[in-house]
Image (cartoon, coloured by chain):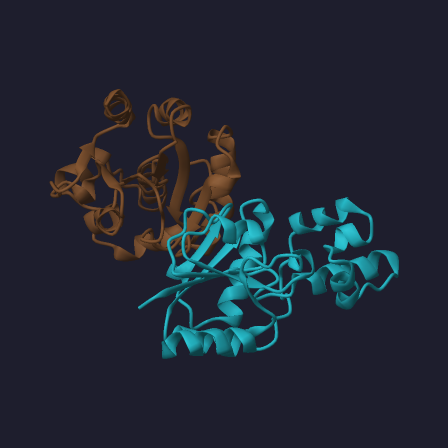
Chain colours: A cyan, B brown
Amino acid sequence: MKRIAIDMDEVLANTNARFIEWYERYTGVKVTEAQLFEKRQKIYQFVGYPELRNQLHIKGFFKDLPLMPDSQAVVKWLSEHYEIFIVTSAMEFRNSMEDKYDWLEKYFPFLPWKNFVFCGRKDMIIADYLIDDHVKNLTTFTGKGILYHAPHNLDNTEFTRVKNWKEIKSYFETELAK
Amino acid sequence: MKRIAIDMDEVLANTNARFIEWYERYTGVKVTEAQLFEKRQKIYQFVGYPELRNQLHIKGFFKDLPLMPDSQAVVKWLSEHYEIFIVTSAMEFRNSMEDKYDWLEKYFPFLPWKNFVFCGRKDMIIADYLIDDHVKNLTTFTGKGILYHAPHNLDNTEFTRVKNWKEIKSYFETELAK
């Protein structure tokens, strides 16, 4: 069985939605995802306040993040054809780990905890595919890299781009038919 | 630079010492490491109480575990010659993660968090060496497996056995001289 490694933030979980929610709560200013895509920026670049990224260190930031649309159903389907690993860069954010773990247990209970990997870099992961929104992770990956569409990676043309989970399903339907 | 993956429990950290400490606190009975080595058993097998293993789920179990002798100095030395990853099976124990993270930051501050990996299995790790006390982890590892001497692995003769961190230093001095 081939193995797919899947990133969490901005791939399974909508981390931007939490940034947008908390930024509005602090400042009253509503940022939209469309604005981030238009400017091709992370939210802390878009609002000109790099320190906003430090929210990632706060307990609860990663708690109950919204799911990316169709991610549950497509990962469930994938898990019937592939070995699924969740590989997330949690180690920069000590306080994210329990929230991330609880989130996976809540929304992806069909995935075994044995296949969760909390790491700091992804160049030591053996898998056939990696679905990730960060080009740096795909560049050092030894298998096939699949880039999940995000405001900060729009310039990249090196990797197969998927815009949503429906496209991921189509991609792997084609792979399975080969 | 070649890469060494190092396990935590029973390799860097003396997890048995905590089991022994808590078991004595609960029951008044003092078990010794020598007894475990003599019977070739984990402590919960030795005392005939398998549920003792559930202590691993309790917050604080992994907090301030004693270091294995010489582990800090030898890992520091190794880190000057190799890329060091800490690879620990934390995912079975959701409540262990923060304790393990804090322990690494406290006792191995010279290792970057980027090189910490909390996982459930180790067969998806790319490294040249893995130092681990569990034969199952070495069996599925694609590099050179080094077995850290422990009561539960005394029967194994398949892997290079190291009894302590001084022996690990000797082993890698020989490797570096090759």
Q: In which quarter of the image is residue A116?
A: bottom left
Q: Which residue is drawn at 28% across and 23% down?
A: B176
Q: Can residue B80 be seen in this view?
A: yes
Q: Residue at x 64, y 57 (%)?
A: A153
Q: Quadrant of residue B129?
A: top left
Residue B166 drawn at (x, y percent): 27, 22
Q: Residue at x 61, y 70 (%)?
A: A163
Number of disc labels: 0
Of residue A164 and residue B67, the one placed in the foreground of this image is A164
Question: As drawn, which residue projects farthest toward the right?
Answer: A28
From what the image shows, is residue A149 above or below residue B162?
below
Residue A64 drawn at (x, y percent): 62, 66
Is residue B8 shown left or right of residue A53? Answer: left
Residue A2 drawn at (x, y percent): 34, 66
Of residue A100 and residue A161, the one placed in the foreground of this image is A161
Q: Which residue is drawn at 34% across and 54% down?
A: B121
